[in-house]
Image: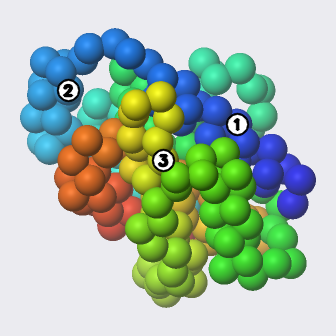
Amino acid sequence: MHKLIKYVGISLLVMGLAACDNKDNNTEAVDNTAASTTAEHTVTLLDGKVSFSLPADISDQSGKVGTQSNNMHVYSDTSGQKAVIVIISEASTDTLAALAERLEQQQRARDPQLQVVSNKSIEIKGHDVQKLDTIISAQGQTTYSSIVLAKVNDQLLTMQISLPADNQAQAQASAESILNTLILK
């Protein structure tokens, strides 16, 4: 459980740093959006037990995060504003709902104005999953975050998708398009 908290903390740090990035990438974002709708690439983890597709503008950045851990995978665009973080850790005896509630409390401690869009149990291709969607504000930036918790192969999978929330409906649709490709075996 301590590992999960550590990795969620790292992911929130990465997300916070992305939100603090004051670069003006408006033209780049338009070009990346057009490219992301036409091409995707598939990521496979846990010897094929977990797979999902990412837009072409999001690539593996795991080696650049400063951790040598094999159970944390970071994917982002060149600006760092779009990120997908996957953490694979030891399974907890807590329910997925209890873990999501704890994550929500931790996020609220960092951002008292946290907006919870949803915190619900869903099913993805026969697997029970807990999904926590939030909007986080930091230094004038808003980020849409969708966190999915699932137990796979006696391990806990935590997948966080963080996107700029300037247009919440678009960010939510983009996160859903990634989650719709998630396959758990």
Left or right of 111 in this view: 77: left
Left or right of 27 in this view: 75: right
Of the two numbered discs 3 and 1 on the same chain, state the one appearing first in sequence.
1
Name the mark on residue 10: 1
* Alpha carbon separation for disc pair 3 and 1: 15 Å
Evaluate whether residue 113 shows in this view: yes
- Kindly indicate the quadrant of the structure image that contains residue 92: bottom right
Circle 3 SS class = strand
Crowd band around label 2 with a 10 angstrom C-alpha radius: few (<14), some (14–19), many (20+): some
Q: How is the image coloured?
A: rainbow
Q: Which residue is mark 3?
A: 136
Circle 2 SS class = helix
Q: Amino acid at mark 1?
A: Ile
Name the mark on residue 109: none
* Alpha carbon separation for disc pair 1 and 2: 25 Å
Which quadrant holds the C terminus?
A: bottom right
Q: Amino acid at mark 2?
A: Ala
Where in the figure is residue 139, as x and y percent of width and height? 47, 28
Q: Which residue is mark 2?
A: 29
